[in-house]
Amino acid sequence: MSRILLICLIFPLAAVYADTIKLKTGEVLQGRVTASSADSVTFEVQFSPTIVEQQIYARADIANLAVEADDEIAYAKIRDIRTPETALNPKVCQALLDNDLAPFLKQFPASARVVDVQQQVKSIQDDLLRLKRGDVKVFGTWYDHAAFDAEKYQIEAATVLEEMKQEIAAKNFPSAMNSFDLLLRSYQNSAAYVEALPLARKAIVSLEQQLNFEIGNLPDTKAQRQANLDRTPVEDRPPIQRAIDAENARAVATALLAQKNNQRFFTIFPFDEQGLQAMQAAVQQIETQLKDVDAKKLAEGARLVRQANEELATHQISEAETTIAQLKATWQEYEGLARMEQRLQAEKTANADSAARANTPALPQ
């Protein structure tokens, strides 16, 4: 028999479940052993994204118990760590080395996985050196610092996308929408814009919820602020009134600064009716624009861009030629299409020259 304890969490469990219990009934369970004694084993399983189930099994009921080593559990968390598809700043790679890979090597120096992690470290260190000398990686393709001007459009778009991701992670949805708005206005023919589309749709939902909540509560917010002022003795009201006036002024100044910077979204002030409604209207305008966007077609175009870049990088000329033809038919507006065709032609020319040299008879000595 087992005893069960459910523990509710406010965040998803990050543990890796790799231990296995096989009961004498034939049932097999995967989870994590958190405690054991001569008589019982406490086993933890994920009941739901926010609930952990602690199950206690008698040793007499267990046919087999397989506990994975701590280093294997730790390795499972970092085994897929690589330089991101888009890397523009050396700090990205340095953080992976310092925060993820180095701690494993320090904690498990005798692990059989050390060689694997060292290979990851070497790969990321090589990428770190490229980033430090000015190269950038955009959607899986490395661009030499000398080629920055040619790829400026795509690189700038990728930079805006990275900012948008950071803002969403920080739940700063007004700033995230400013980033997307910039992509929408200036970089629609970039791969970054395509990747930003699903992120923007989620950010729109979150921002709309915030704005609707504040607008719905606006009368109560204003009434509460006035009630707090009214309850204050008359002689103590002037500094409070000055603080309220300063707060109102900050809201107006924030909106004006955003307008000056050609930004439609700014810090939410719950009492700023004009600002809240302006942002609500801006969200609705963007939603209207996105209704006409063929997201599936653009996603397929972005996939073909990545595939063609990979094929060109590995000198798969015939495959790249086919992929680029598909890209041209799917997303002809892609800003980097002409340069991609130039790269293909250069590969074909280099391949032809190499073949010609190989077929040229050597001169007699």
Image (spheres, rainbow, N blue to C red):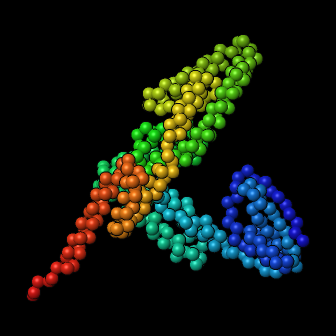
Q: Is residue 236 left or right of residue 107?
A: right
Residue at 55% of width from left, 46% of height from top? 199
Asked if residue 132 shows in the view, the reply is: no
Q: Is 253 placed above or below 364 here?
A: above
Q: Residue furthest front?
A: 329
Asked if residue 214 shows in the view, the reply is: yes
Q: Residue furthest bottom?
A: 365
Corner quadrant of residue 353: bottom left
Residue at 44% of width from left, 65% of height from top? 125
Q: How many marks?
A: 0
Q: Which residue lies furthest to the top in this view?
A: 234
Q: In this view, does 152 lie to the left or right of 30?
A: left
- The image shows residue 172 at horizontal and vertical percentages of 57, 40
Q: Is residue 119 left or right of residue 69?
A: left
Residue at 48% of width from left, 30% of height from top? 258
Corner quadrant of residue 351: bottom left
Q: In this view, does 91 lie to the left or right of 199?
A: left
Of the pair 321 and 282, the residue shown nearer to us: 321
- The image shows residue 232 at horizontal and vertical percentages of 74, 17
- The image shows residue 215 at horizontal and vertical percentages of 65, 27
Q: Is 316 placed above or below 216 here?
A: below
Check the picture and name the quadrant holding the N terminus: bottom right
Of the pair 330 and 274, the residue shown nearer to us: 330
Check the picture and name the quadrant holding the C terminus: bottom left
Residue at 74% of width from left, 70% of height from top? 30
- The image shows residue 79 at horizontal and vertical percentages of 56, 68
Q: Residue furthest right?
A: 1
